Amino acid sequence: MTDNASPWNERARFELARFERPSAISFLGYALGLVVIFWCLAGVGFSVEKVASAPPRFADFAARAFPPNLDPQVLSRLGWKMVETLQIAFAGAVIGVILSVPVALLAAKGLIAGPWVNQIVRTGLSFIRAVPDIAWALVFVVAVGLGPFAGMLAIVIDTIGFCGRFFADDMEATDKGPAESLTATGARKLDVVACATIPGSLPAFISTSLFALEKAVRSSTILGLVGAGGIGIELKVGFDLFDYPTAMTVILMIAVVVIGIELVSGWARTKIIGEQR
Amino acid sequence: MRDTLSSTISSVTDLLLKRQAAPDVLTEQTGAAFAPVSPVEIEARAVSKTFGATPIFSDVSFRLARGEATALVGANGTGKSTLLRCLMGLIPTSTGSVHLLGQQTDEATGRQMRNMRAQVGLVSQKHNLVPRLSVLSNVLHGLLGKHPGIRHWSHSLAPQSSRETAIQALERVGLADFAHRRADRLSGGQSQRVAIARAIVGAPKILFADEPCASLDPSAGEDVMELFFRLVRDENVTVVFTSHNIEHALKYGDRVLGLAQGRIQLDATAASLSSADLRGLYD
Ligand SMILES: Nc1ncnc2c1ncn2[C@@H]1O[C@H](COP(=O)(O)OP(=O)(O)O)[C@@H](O)[C@H]1O
Ligand SMILES: [Mg+2]
């Protein structure tokens, strides 16, 4: 006890704090992590030669793709495809967000449903998220046929998986005070949720919904690869026909639109929520 | 630490002795021996509460009569808010039972509980208004116990009679002009007055107030306490309020319950106490 107070030991304590010796368990963890990484690299057939030969081949693609196809007729066709893409994204995101609210009410702990229902709904939402959007698109193409309607349904489901979960988290994190005050005066659960919980979570809902919209726009650009509508089909056709300039135009259009949506949604988020805090 | 503890214990024993000498609080309230004792509206029977393995309080028993204002005092973290929540049935008691308006809360069905609570109002330390809604909508929410359903969610949907009731409640707290302002555009004192309007709009029989002025500066807090008790005093409303402020407890309470070390250590009429008596409870 007493030697601990000596300056030397004080010193030693500070030195120790800087480098912590890993425990046997964490050492094993690191080693295992390294093994797994090498195993994965082997699995993907990682090859230095291919990496080395990629730049020339990429340069070849770039040379054949540039300049992008700016033929007005092609541009107008692609532009309309992009409009359809955004229609899929907006319709799907809006319907998905609306349907997410009741789903989230069932998923949120201590709101209107018991723990069993919470768990079942949350598991369902995990499943929805676990299935990739492109796989949902394939399922809906089978269900309702080729075209943008299948794509929209895929976006709806994808949005419910995302917003259902995060709306529920948002509501669980809202200030419980207003809800308690209303419960104390005999309000029903549904009324408490409608009057206190949902208005209290609204800024978080808006923020989450804008993220969902960004995600929907990104997804909708590739749904065409499986025939679920939107500009993705043009990308596939461009590559299939070795029409690289047109494919390049599509890629650039997607990039511009996705970046544009992210900018607009970021601006809207600060505009709507920043002002309300 | 030891000093304050022993002084607490000695002042508490003083008070307990004093209390035994005093006649029963309920009959003393009514004055004449023949007058009927006011009906008991809140009764706690050997209530205890533990959170996990942590005991908060135990063996809490009292009966509060109609029209009585009871101050619940005690240091920070002794469980005053928790006790209020148990009384309102917002959280279950660990043992013992609570009877509110003649009904045992843990045996009531959901509907009975809501009907009971429709006669109860709550004002908390934080005003707990819904920030993005109008003042009027917030006050209308105080009627949800009596009128469930979408028409009382917002001032735009509310029936005219309820709007008038809510405006009247706002008039009584002096904020009728603010009815359409957003609740998060009010000062702290104004917010707390709106919270009071929301609590009284349904003409409750019982009002609970959990440190209603603790989040306000002293002069705004004084105004809020004055207003609150002016509104409830003439209406024969039963009030239970917690307070940090010894002067408030003595000034506004008819009766003082002191919570310390997980027990009710003090139960006496405010008139029989001095602020020195109470100080020990806060150490
Ligand atoms: N939901 C809860 N879960 C666990 N502990 C709690 C909970 N609510 C309150 N407590 C604890 O109970 C004690 C009493 O809290 P509270 O009733 O708020 O005291 P007071 O209102 O007298 O200041 C505190 O120690 C607090 O940490
Ligand atoms: Mg408290």
Image (cartoon, rainbow, N blue to C red):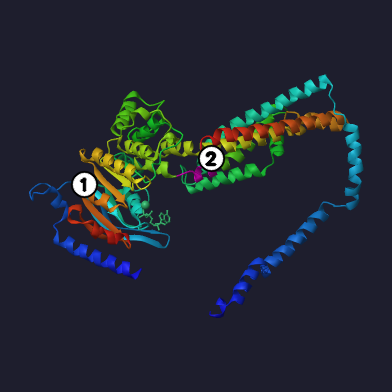
Q: Which residue is at 23% across, 48% downward?
A: B251
> How many marks are shown on the rendered structure?
2
Residue name at image x 56 percent, y 80 percent: A3
Give the left or right position of residue A214, taking residue B84 as reference.
right
Q: Is residue B108 magenta?
A: no
| Residue B162 falls left or right of residue A103 | left
Ligand 1, what quadrant?
Answer: bottom left
Determine whether A163 is above or below B25 in the image. Answer: above
Q: Is any part of residue A111 visible from this angle?
A: yes
Q: Which quadrant: the N terminus of chain B? A: bottom left
Residue A246 % position (x, y): 84, 28
Find residue B228 and report its horizontal and vertical position in percent.
Answer: 28, 40
Identify the magenta region. Answer: A167-175
Find the residue positioned furthest to the bottom.
A2
Q: CA distance from mark 2 to mark 1?
A: 44 Å
Relative depth, front residue between A48 and B6: B6
Pick whichever, A106 or B282, lies toward us. B282
**In-front residue for pair B33/B248:** B248
Specify the amino acid type for callout 2.
Answer: Ala
Residue B138: image quadrant is: top left
Residue A104, numbered label: 2
Q: Is residue A70 above or below residue A100?
A: above
Side (left or right) of A33 relative to B10: right
Say left or right for A58 vs B61.
right
Residue B120 location, quadrant: top left
